[in-house]
Amino acid sequence: MAQINPSILSADFARLAEEARAVDGADWLHVDVMDNHFVPNLTLGLPVVESLRKATDTPLDCHLMIEAPDRWAPAYAEAGAGSVTFHAEAAAAPVRLAREIRAQGARASMALRPATPIEPYEDLLPELDMLLIMTVEPGFGGQAFLDIMLPKIRRARRMMDRHGLEMWLQVDGGVSASTIERCAEAGADVFVAGSAVYNADDPAGAVAALREQAERASGPHRH
Ligand code: DX5
Ligand code: ZN
């Protein structure tokens, strides 16, 4: 089943509760946490996640684009995030960190920037519930999808299949009606979409349309 996670980075931050409800039918709400160090942009942190948790029934998928995730990521799980993603490039001890996130009852996920290869992390995959392959340089919404990431998505899915892992494969950045099918064909099953959802006249309708496209494009190899 394809899952669509609207990114509230493209929403109106002064009306977050309302914006969360505007994507009724979304599988998860993607929350981009940026610290102006790991990426050149600053968004929101724990207090906003705690409030958002109370404002919506949609589970929160927190994407931490921060330095020192070893220090901060478990607190996001504790704050009620259902899934916590840290970046491989920033984590000092990714195995310990994934275990801490799981111990807090959340799904543990690791993200790779476009230039970070997946191969060095093959043995770590069983520690994770999801792998996020960035399809833009992290930091901003509305950027163009990087087609050159498709081979990495394919290699990641093959690697997961080879190890018999049930884990999810998420793509984030430039995912829209014109790119989601390529991602699904390559083996992604969780799709983050910011501008493609929140810039649409009918955000909930855009979520449903994207899911349908992804479902149709995903091959028979998908669960
Ligand atoms: C970018 C963020 C994305 C962003 C995606 O660094 O991680 O989640 O919101 O936005 P779009 O879908 O507009 O590329
Ligand atoms: Zn993101």
Image (spheres, rainbow, N blue to C red):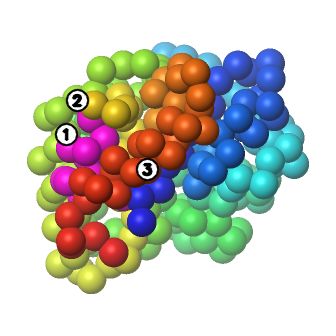
Q: Is residue 30 left or right of residue 140?
A: right
Q: Is residue 18 above or below residue 78?
A: above
Packing grade of label 1 (10 A; few <14, some 14-19, many >=20) is some
Secondary structure beneath dot 3 equals helix
Say whether disc 3 or disc 1 marks the residue closer to the N-terminus: 1
List x then y, in percent, for residue 195: 49, 24
| Residue 177 falls left or right of residue 96 | left
- Amino acid carrying mark 1 in the image: Met
Residue 64 in view: no
Q: Position of residue 100 (x, y in %)?
A: 62, 67
Position in image of residue 167 (x %, y %) = 39, 70
**Is residue 13 depicted above or below 94 in this figure?**
above
The circle drawn on residue 149 is 1
Q: Which residues are magenta?
A: 179-189
Side of 159 where 209 appears, left or right: right
Give the image location of residue 147, x and y in percent.
17, 33
Choose the circle earlier in sequence order: 3 or 2: 2
* Quadrant in the rendering for residue 145: top left
Q: State the quadrant of the N terminus.
A: bottom left
Using the numbered discs, state the Cα–Cα distance from disc 2 to disc 1 in whole angstroms. Answer: 6 Å
Q: Which residue is mark 2?
A: 146
Q: What is the secondary structure assignment of the residue under circle 1?
A: helix
Near-viewer residue (206 or 98): 206
